[in-house]
Amino acid sequence: MRLNNNYAVVTEDLLKTFGSFIAVDHVSLQVRKGEIFGFLGPNGAGKSTTIRMLCGLLTPTAGRGSVNGLDIATRPEEIRRVIGYMSQKFSLYDDLTAEENIDFFAGMYGVPREQREERKRYALEMANLTERRRAMTRTLSGGWKQRLALGCAILHDPPVLFLDEPTSGVDPIARQAFWDLIREFSKTGHTVFVSTHYMDEAEYCHRVALMYRGKVIALGAPAELKQGLTSHQLYQLDTPDPLAAMRALEGVEGVQSAIFGGGLHVSVAGEGDPSGHIRQALARGGNEIRRLDRIQPSMEDVFVATIEAEEQKAA
Amino acid sequence: MSYRRLRAVFVKELHHITRDRLSLAMALATPIMFLLLFGYALSLDVDQIPTLIYDQDHTPESRDLIRQFEGSRYFHIRGNVSHYSDIEREIDRNRTLLAVVIPPDYSRNLAAGRRAQVQIILDGSDSNTASIALGYVQAVVRNYSVTPIVTPPVDPRLRVWYNASLESKNYVVPGLIAVILQIIAALLTSLTIAREWENGSMEQLLSTPLRPTELVLGKMLAYFVVGVVDATIAVLVGVFIFQVPLRGSVLLMAVSTCIFLFGALFWGIFISAVTRNQLQAYQMGLMSSFLPSFLLSGFVYSIENMPRVVQAITYVVPSRYAITILKGVFLKGIGINVLWIDFAFLLLYATAVFFLAVRKLKGKIA
């Protein structure tokens, strides 16, 4: 297998099946060193399974992978020394204090004695827990716990960090703060491989892979992926009755609509200005149009359009 | 193996143990409770047998025989009856265990130099107690019938070794210590790995350089501290409350108890690694330690009397060896020169279960 030293994570045709269920379907990826690589997709798309194979927690059914130049099939023990991993479920010890959790993981990762105090101080400061270092972990709120978990996962300054849905169940402000930490961490040359089902979090990533039913269906920088959506134009429609508007647009050739917030996102295939076309269809159904604006597609739009294309291919 | 990781696991487990005050209190109180409960309840001594007398003879000779029973501490005469149906009723209602029936021709036969007969009716539904009671009856009757005649040619002078007063607590308590330790140790550790699986920390641990050997040893050592305290409490209760003589080497007892504890603790860890579920682990831990150590260890039922197949099974029951050693050290005062085989088996068991547990943990999540 080609072990290019510029890549922190490489997979080639990685496959994982559980019985007849294909959880990860021939995934091939290359993650550059120092990159924040986002793994996007709905629950059950195979994101966690891929990450767990890369961390040596699951054995792939077929295919290959490497982390930091180490083959996942043959050198899992060495991989464990160079990665940090934060699992989907909060997995520190509730009945230990913040400090005791840090001490424990410092022991696990074999942080050298002379660095231990300094790494611990760093982790506590980063998690903003210096004052509450002796508080029982159970008493900390979601955002604190999650930052503590991150602190524990990077005690040994790992070159590659795997975060599996780190922001699920955390409030928006804490999510923002968490992504700031991740960006800081990546600036110092560390690679971050992060999965999420929040599409808006793609904006924080250098590159993202969209995963759907075990397959990578799109891969690239967020801006690239959005620009790649040229075959469609996207309109934001503000109307008093979005459901009625949706029905009015049903069956119109090349037009797809989806409820988005209080309004409707209407995507139209083809070039030219289709807005007149949309207005006519809506007027026929007696719908009032408050506003109709062409908008930049969001990651969610990209995802929906890509899945539809994928399903049409399959059908 | 890394000493630092081992120590980190050990320290972490000690934190878990000291934080969970209720479980810790239970773990320390259980040996005392068990010893007091079983030590007193599990008495296999048979005395004060409730006895009925049906004297059909009513002569000085028959009353003399009855006095023999009255004078023995093994019998408690509950009264005299005048009909068989009374005996039947009392036995059916569990109010008496034994009835002595003296026939009307008893004294006449004695006077004529013929064999006089006495009928003994026993409730055999508890065969153990019944046969012991029968033994006492025969002793009383034999003594009585021998006295007036000539001295028999052979005069057995019985001397019971190691437990001269034949008190059952002397052999129940040492065995009980082994049974208690087996149960507590297995239960203590049976939850530990299952808990890590349940709260997701196992996955986190598997992503670190931690090796199964370090995890198993670190956890075992933390609970070993609790086990040693329990063992000390149990031995002290045995010696000072039950007054069981401790005749042999305390060192031999300490070392073999530690090895026995290792095995029992590893067993709990193994169960925990297999089930990955705290409830199941607890149930399996209880079943797999309580039943064999109670029934198949020679604690209550002697192994020599079991069917061959069951005897073969007892070889993999570690309490069997621990009980032999504890009884040997407590009552007989024998040393390693006699007990080395049992000692070796304990060591073998602990080692085997340790490797089983480590192997079980080497597997990945799926």
Image (spheres, rainbow, N blue to C red):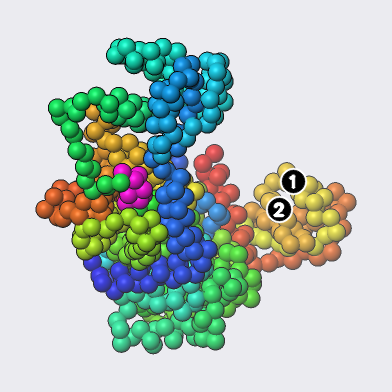
As drawn, is A11 to the left or to the right of A198?
left
The subunit letter for the residue under badge 2 reads A
Residue B319 vertical placement versus A29 (above, below): above
Q: In x, y percent, where is residue A167?
A: 56, 67
Kindly identify which residue carries mark 2. A257
Q: Secondary structure at mark 1?
A: loop
As drawn, is A301 to the left or to the right of B6?
right
The subunit letter for the residue under badge 1 reads A
| Chain-order first, disc 1 or disc 2 | 1
Residue A149 lies in the magenta-colored region: no
- Going 56% across and 44% down the picture, which residue do you hit? A312
Query: Within 10 angstroms of label 1, few (less than 14), some, or many (20 or more) residues?
Result: some
Query: Within 10 angstroms of label 2, few (less than 14), some, or many (20 or more) residues?
Result: many
Mark 1–mark 2 CB contact (< 8 Å): yes
- Between B167 and A31, the one nearer to me in the picture: B167
Residue A268 vertical placement versus B112 (above, below): below
Q: Which residues are magenta?
A: B166-176
Measured in 3D between alpha carbons, the distance from the residue under mark 1 to the one under mark 2, in whole angstroms, is 8 Å
Q: Is residue A221 visible?
A: no
Residue B168 lies in the magenta-colored region: yes
Q: Amino acid at mark 1?
A: Glu
- Between B48 and A216, the one nearer to me in the picture: B48
Q: In x, y percent, where is residue B244?
A: 32, 55
Q: Quadrant of residue B296?
A: top left
Q: Is residue A236 visible?
A: yes
Q: Amino acid at mark 2?
A: Ser
Q: Quadrant of residue A18?
A: top left
Q: In x, y percent, where is residue A249?
A: 76, 49
- Going 45% across and 74% down the picture, which residue do you hit? A101
Kindly identify which residue carries mark 1. A250
Residue B129 vertical placement versus B323 (above, below): above
Are dots 1 and 2 on a single chain? yes
